[in-house]
Image (tube, rainbow, N blue to C red):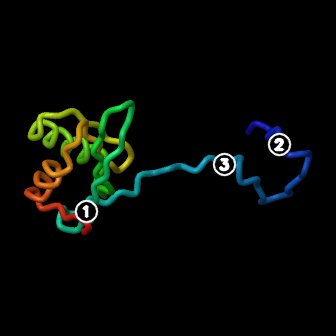
Amino acid sequence: MKKNLFEMGADLGEGWEADNKVKQNKAEDVTNTPPEKHRLYLSKEKRRGKVVTIVKPFHLAKSDLQTLLKQLKKRLGTGGTVRDNTLEFQGDIPDQVRNALEEMQYRFRI
């Protein structure tokens, strides 16, 4: 293991390690939650002068989220992407996104 440059020669002894030496493995512990259990909310952001509609948080595996995004993009006729556990759509279309997701049995916060 590489020696950390910021440890000033401290010997931690047997069985002890510095916190910054071991990288945490971010294993996706995502359980696929049924649509009825989701509590989503919508927001809008302005990026480079254009509006982006954001829907989050989804509790789905990455592949399932990609599939959902593909269905919604085709249905809404707009572009979009997946970031972390959110879906981002191009344009100011929160009502259309909400209606499409509600027809798929997803629920929203009030």
Residue 63 placement (x, y as % from top left):
26, 43
Relative to 5, is 42 above or below?
A: below
105 vs 97, nearest the viewer: 97
Residue 23 placement (x, y as % from top left):
62, 47
Q: CA distance from mark 1 to mark 3?
A: 31 Å
The outermost residue toward the front is 49
Task: Report the amino acid beneath label 1.
Answer: Thr
Marks 3 and 1: in contact by CB < 8 Å?
A: no
61 vs 94, nearest the viewer: 94
Task: Report the amino acid beneath label 3.
Answer: Val
Report helix, strand or loop for mark 3.
loop
The tally of labels here is: 3
Task: Report the amino acid beneath label 2.
Answer: Phe
107 vs 18, nearest the viewer: 107
| Residue depicted at x 11% and y 51% | 100
Relative to 103, is 76 above or below?
A: above
Asked if residue 93 lies left or right of residue 82, the reply is left
What label sits on residue 33 in the rendered view?
Answer: 1
Asked if residue 27 lies left or right of residue 9, the reply is left
Report helix, strand or loop for mark 1.
loop
Q: CA distance from mark 2 to mark 1?
A: 43 Å
| Residue depicted at x 10% and y 56% | 104
Marks 2 and 3: in contact by CB < 8 Å?
A: no
What label sits on residue 22 in the rendered view?
Answer: 3
Q: Earlier in the sequence, mark 2 or mark 1?
A: 2
Read off the residue under disc 2.
6
Q: Quadrant of residue 108?
A: bottom left
Q: CA distance from mark 3 to mark 2?
A: 14 Å
